[in-house]
Image (cartoon, rainbow, N blue to C red):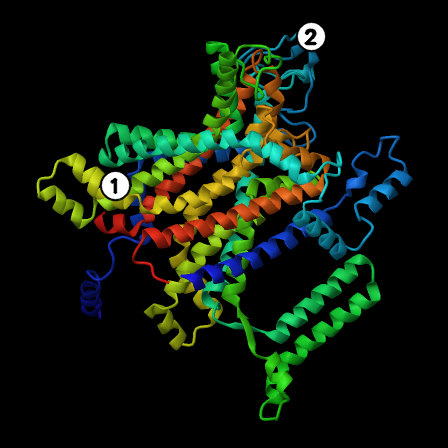
Amino acid sequence: MLSFIGRSLIQKIVTLFFVSVVSFLIIHLAPGKPSQVDPMNPKFTPEMVERFQKEFHLDKPLYIQYLYFYRGLFTGKIVSWKDNRSVLAKIWERFLNSLPLFIVGTLLTWTLSFPVGIRSAIYRGGIYDRSATFISYLLISIPGFFFAYILIILVVTTLHVPVIGMETFGLRASSWGNMLMDRVWHLLIPSVLGATGGIAVLSRYVRSQMLEVEGQDYVRTARAKGLPPEQVHYKHALRNALLPFVTMFGLILPGLIGGSVIIESIFSWPGMGRMAYEAILARDYPIILTLNFIAAVLVLVGTFISDLLYLVVDPRIRL
Amino acid sequence: MDTMTDAQHILEAPSAPRQTRLQQLWGLFRENRLAILGLIIFLFFLVFAVIGVILTSGQEPVFNPAMIRLQEKLLPPLTRPDIHTLQPDEIPALSVYLFGTDDLGRDVFARMLQGAWVSLTVGFVAVGISVLVGIFMGGIAGYFGQAMIRFDQIMVSCIMLGGAVLLALGETRTGIGILVAGHAYIFFSIFSKRLLSGRNLPRWFILLHRGAISIDTIIMRTVDIMLCFPTFFLILTVVALLPASMYNIMIVIGLTSWMGTTRFVRAEFLSLREQDFVTAAKALGVGNLRIIFRHMMPNAIGPVLVSSTIGIATAILTEAGLSFLGFGVPPPHATWGNILSDGKRFIFDAPWLTFIPGIAILIVVLCFNLFGEGLRDALNPKLRERG
């Protein structure tokens, strides 16, 4: 067990190192320089560019820049090229904005897909199963931005509530209840959108997992003993079907950063995805690289947690 | 002679399978109604895209997607153009705006025709790239995976990489020198086995020739590294940094999505390699390449086909998303994503500008997903035995 943890930690650190090198190379070897972002700006004189390059070590060779960057990242001193503020502070601020979106989306995904998937599996081939299957294909296939506009039209024209942004501008003076409802309405559509794809995929997975377990001999035995169907489905079958999902808890983590770029830019939600989009537009390399690094760390931590959970949950696995 | 062949015929007839594998597959596939629907929609889309690229390109296209008619802007679908205010060559080919016009008075039907080809090629080329890379990497990892890479090979490739970097940085003479030295060493090492066998070699030389790391490890760790990147964010970054073009998007999507295929192919190859027919082929002296491509690949291709069909759907969605964010194919060319992105400003006045491309993307992506799932069911050995 300990040796497994040690080995996988070393392996993950090596992977992380290569990820940092590759992402650094991709960004810095791409054509164009951050100092060329705004060539028409009269304030961008050659002296300015030179000062800018000196300030951010852009005149040094690439490997020195790499060392400077990651030293800055680990000591927390790295600053954004746009406004000279600390990158970590900026990301933390945006992270707090993204967090409610992520939490609500994840909760919706995990609470809705299980009932749908289990019911589909129990009434396999029925009208419910077939329509659930078709709807989940529809939800997987629909482009997120198109679905967002459909939902916006629906909600705005039928319920007359504001949906763009995190809160309605100038509502500070209003009562506490109003503000809460305002927040909830703003949160609802983006998180539903973020959850749709997840619900569709996860419910299909729950269904296939459940079907596999329902075909096993011990379930047939339980049924033959004359146990009530609820007990067969929920006590005998479901418990074993749940096994792979416990390990999936670890894999939610990377969703914190990826995947929200389009939704956050449609809804003007000041979260991490939108920050990434803005940083890419402005060629703010420190922010792009830091976000990439954090995303890689989250993926590695997620797989590590899911490996550990597998060990805990499945007694057949011994290391 | 006749009776002889008859007897042979009778003897062989029962042992031959009644159906070929393809017929069997088609029989299973045909039972899945949704998958057939997907196939039909896909064929329709293919025809639409091919006709589209014929009719909208050239000097004087039948449907001109770039024709601007400012007096005809934001007309709803199925409106007839006002013939009196238009020049003769400005009148649309069907003399009706089938899908309406956009904010510059361009015919949305013509733009959809033009955009269909972009979606189709992005989907197929990106997935083609990812499947080629995936099969190549997965095949090597699965078939040659146990072979070790030696220390000297690693060192030479590092040195040559350094030479290439120096060359790229402008240090031409040193760079070329290092590259030539590296190639010389490679040539030397090819013949060195015969030259050096039986001699007393120094210890450092033997140490250099020790295996350091297996090919399988290298490839699978590369897959792990690639999986660490958040895909859409990486694609967005690279596409934004590179000059805007359709080919860059295809290549970037292809190069960021080969990891799944690699894992499938490797897993299949690892199990196939141990099977008797491969041993038999090896015993007959069949070459490695022929074993890989003639004997093993047809058996490993099933999951790859399924994942690439679904990969096409994902690639089309990704391209549409990039176009929507403004990083897609550069503007005068229409894509479904940028028609939708342009139309979102008029979402309440001209909803067709949002709904027509949106529903088109939805239907095409849906057909690929349904087709892929149908294929997966048809290829599933558990179902095949029952059928």
In the image, residue A188 lies at what x, y percent? 47, 22
- From the image, state whether disc 2 or disc 1 is nearer to you: 1
Query: Disc 2 to disc 1, how far (Cα)?
Result: 69 Å
Report the disc number at residue B258. none
Quadrant in which the N terminus of chain B appears: bottom left
Residue B175 image position (x, y, % from top left):
79, 66
Do the residues indicated by labels 2 and 1 lie within the same chain of the protein? Answer: no
* A14 left or right, relative to A111: right
Residue highlighted by disc 2? B85
- Looking at numbered disc 2 in the image, what kind of residue is underneath it? Thr
The residue shown at (17%, 45%) is A219
How many other residues sit within 10 Å of disc 2, few (<14), some (14-19) or many (≥20)? few
In the rendering, at what x and y percent does residue A110 appear?
A: 38, 34
- Report the disc number at residue A238: 1
Q: Secondary structure at mark 2?
A: loop
Q: Chain of mark 1?
A: A
Query: Residue at image x 15%, y 36%?
Result: A229
Closest to the observer, A212 or A275: A275
Contact, CB < 8 Å: mark 2 with mark 1?
no
- Quadrant hosting residue B373: top left
- Which is nearer the eye, B109 or A43? A43
> Which of these two is toward me, B299 or B41?
B299
Would residue B30 be visible to someone looking at this image?
A: no
Is A163 in front, or is B4?
A163
Residue B213 at x, y = what percent? 54, 70
Q: Residues within 10 Å of mark 1 (few under 14, many from 20)?
A: some
Question: Can residue A261 be spotted in the picture?
Answer: yes
Q: Is residue B74 above or below residue B123?
A: above
Q: Residue at x 64, y 84 (%)?
A: B204
The subunit carrying tag 2 is B
In-image side of B278 versus B75 (left or right)? left
